Image (tube, rainbow, N blue to C red):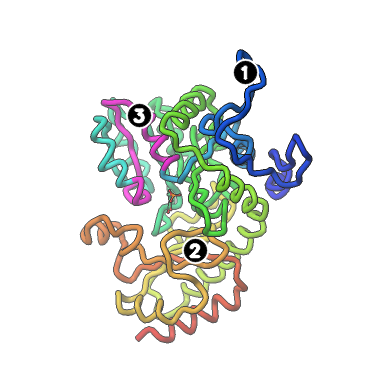
Amino acid sequence: MLDNTKLLHGYPVVDQFTGAASIPKYQASTFNQKEILGTQDYTYTRFGNPTVAALEEGIATLEGAKFGFAFSSGMAAISTVLMLLKAGEHVILPLEVYGGTCQFVNDILPNYNIEASFVDCSDIEAVKAAVKPNTKMLYIETPSNPLLKVTDIKAMVEIAKANNLMTALDNTFMTPLYQKPLEMGVDMVIESATKFLNGHSDVVAGLLATNDEELAATLKVYQKSFGGILGVEDSWLILRGMKTMGIRMEKSVQNATAIAEYMAKHPKVKNVFYPGLASHPNHDVHMSQAANGGAVLSFELADENAVADFSAALNVPIIAVSLGGVESIVSYPRTMSHACISEEERQEQGVTQGLLRFSCGIEDTEDLLADLEAALAKVK
Ligand SMILES: Cc1ncc(COP(=O)(O)O)c(C=O)c1O
């Protein structure tokens, strides 16, 4: 079965009890136990629920995994994975890791005596050099946010295997349709399902998948004990959103490609960052591990004033934090995702005053290009 068919038939999509063509919302916190001394699949929703379980099977199917887990946010999934580390251990993460992950690592892990190093993961030698005797995990995010830097997944897995490290990969930007980290030997893959998997900017959720039985058993205990399981209503909304993910993603990627090509030629655009462009420094690595450039790009205008003129003139995209909706979303990393780091750190990472991120929705390409052209004309 290929992915588009899997999205519609590859996991429980029909209710086994009634035949309903949409998995019902089993909106119950607890379940009647037929025999007080017996066992049954569902007893209490924090431990498991049929609607949530359908989604968990869905993510496992898409990632090519044996085990799937649904969390109340991408951050709940990420923090659960990082809490697999024990006191005295060390994790390596990308320098430009998602802001929420960075904050968790900096503000919370030290309380548990867990060490971290932030490394430029597009430089594999730098990653090798950062491995210490107590390193236990390589945490990967590719392409990165907001500059779409690429990490060579297979090279990271090789380092991990040579040093007996766990690997976890945040696959939010490429999604399980376009990048399959578990097939490349990664141990755990994380998705902020808030984004493309749900696709409608109306749910916050996280998904996690693995083939490792031991890790899965531990993750199940953590999911239950931290209590960060996804709610029934939100699971149902993602099940619904996922069914159209294939065609949504196709259109979004088509828009991203057209916009990246258009922006790359525009005289008022200083830089375009999109791994689908042949001019991207890691285009070849990215295309060896992903099906296309994805639906997110960034571009740089001259300065803050240019950003203000441009965004005030836009009519089609919304201006917001987040990505992965059916509507295009423009974000300003400097005051949004990267607001909590210093101006100096932002400059070091290339998050300049002129940088904007564009998450492409499924609007008509012609309308998006016309809107961008009109907005760029307003930039002085
Ligand atoms: C790459 C990436 N990972 C993780 C997250 C966190 O996901 P959530 O907001 O669902 O907790 C985000 C959110 O923007 C993200 O962009």
Q: Is residue 289 above or below residue 325?
A: above
- Mark 1 sits on what residue? 39
Q: Nearer the viewer, mark 1 or mark 3?
A: 1
Place of residue 118 in the rendered image (x, y in percent of width and height, measured from the top left) = 29, 43
Question: Which of the two residues, 151 or 359, is positioned nearer the viewer here?
Answer: 359
Magenta stretch encompasses residue 85: yes
- Mark 2 sits on what residue? 359
Q: Is residue 237 above or below residue 33?
A: below
- Mark 3 sits on what residue? 85
Task: Identify the element where label 3 is drawn.
Answer: loop
Residue at image point 50% right, 28% down: 220
Left or right placement of residue 55 versus residue 193 in this view: right
Residue at image point 27% right, 31% down: 114
Question: Which of the two residues, 246 or 9, is positioned nearer the viewer here?
Answer: 9
Magenta stretch encompasses residue 330: no
Specify start and end residues of the magenta stretch as a single range: 76-101
| Label 1 – label 3 distance at C-alpha | 32 Å
Q: Quadrant of residue 137?
A: top left
Place of residue 316 in the rendered image (x, y in percent of width and height, measured from the top left) = 52, 76
CB-based contact (under 8 Å), mark 1 and mark 3? no
Left or right placement of residue 151 versus residue 177 in this view: left
Identify residue type, mark 3: Leu
Identify residue type, mark 2: Ser
| Label 1 – label 2 distance at C-alpha | 46 Å
CB-based contact (under 8 Å), mark 1 and mark 2? no
Q: Is residue 209 above or below residue 266?
A: above
Q: Who comes first in sequence, dot 3 or dot 2? A: 3
Q: Is residue 238 above or below residue 135?
A: below
Place of residue 103 in the rendered image (x, y in percent of width and height, measured from the top left) = 30, 46
